Image: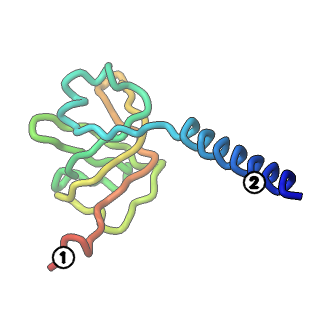
Amino acid sequence: MAGTRASRLGIVAVCMAALVALMFVSIEPNTQYYIDEVMESPEDYEGNIHLRGQVEPGSIDSSMSLFMLIGIEYSLSIDYSGAAIPDGFDEGHTIAIKGQLVNSGHGWILMAKEIQTGCPSKYSE
């Protein structure tokens, strides 16, 4: 009976190790870049990307679902028609965006899939 219990525990341990290994293999690392870093050579970052920047004051155009994301030196048009707007999204706030960086022919644009803001309670006094 002791051998069967040890066998079962061994099988459970192997299964758990396999699940943990599968979890780590399936998780894609998600490096977050600042807008200035990307816009120095945007062709190197074309495709799926995770960006951080500030919403340019006065740039939100809700009728066209566009706004500008700015860094220190560069800016980028963001099309948020494919993303939900979270609480805390406003002009002048720093946000993180996951999406597709594409060259539209008229310049670079990020087609947003997900927009993240910081926790408002974290910054309130």
The image shows residue 125, relative to residue 117, as above or below, that is: below
Q: Residue furthest bottom?
A: 125
Residue type at mark 1 is Ser
Q: Residue at position x 30%, y 25% from top?
A: 106
Q: Residue furthest front?
A: 2
Residue type at mark 2 is Leu
| Callout 2 secondary element | helix
Q: Residue at position x 19%, y 24% from top?
A: 40
Q: Nearer the viewer, residue 4 or 38?
A: 4
Q: Earlier in the sequence, mark 1 or mark 2?
A: 2
Indicate the position of residue 24 as horizontal and vertical percent values. Answer: 54, 40
Image quadrant where one finds the N terminus: bottom right
Q: Residue furthest left?
A: 72
Q: Quadrant of residue 75?
A: top left
Indicate the position of residue 83 as horizontal and vertical percent values. Answer: 45, 52
Tell me, for residue 56, which label it has, or none. none
Q: Badge 1 is on which residue?
A: 124
Q: Badge 2 is on which residue?
A: 9
**Disc 1 to disc 2, C-alpha distance:** 50 Å
Image quadrant where one finds the C terminus: bottom left
Q: Nearer the viewer, residue 60 or 43?
A: 43
Give the crowd class for mark 2: few <14, some 14-19, many >=20 residues within 10 Å. Answer: few
Q: Is residue 92 left or right of residue 64?
A: left
> Is mark 1 in CB contact (under 8 Å) with mark 2?
no
Indicate the position of residue 64 as horizontal and vertical percent values. Answer: 37, 49
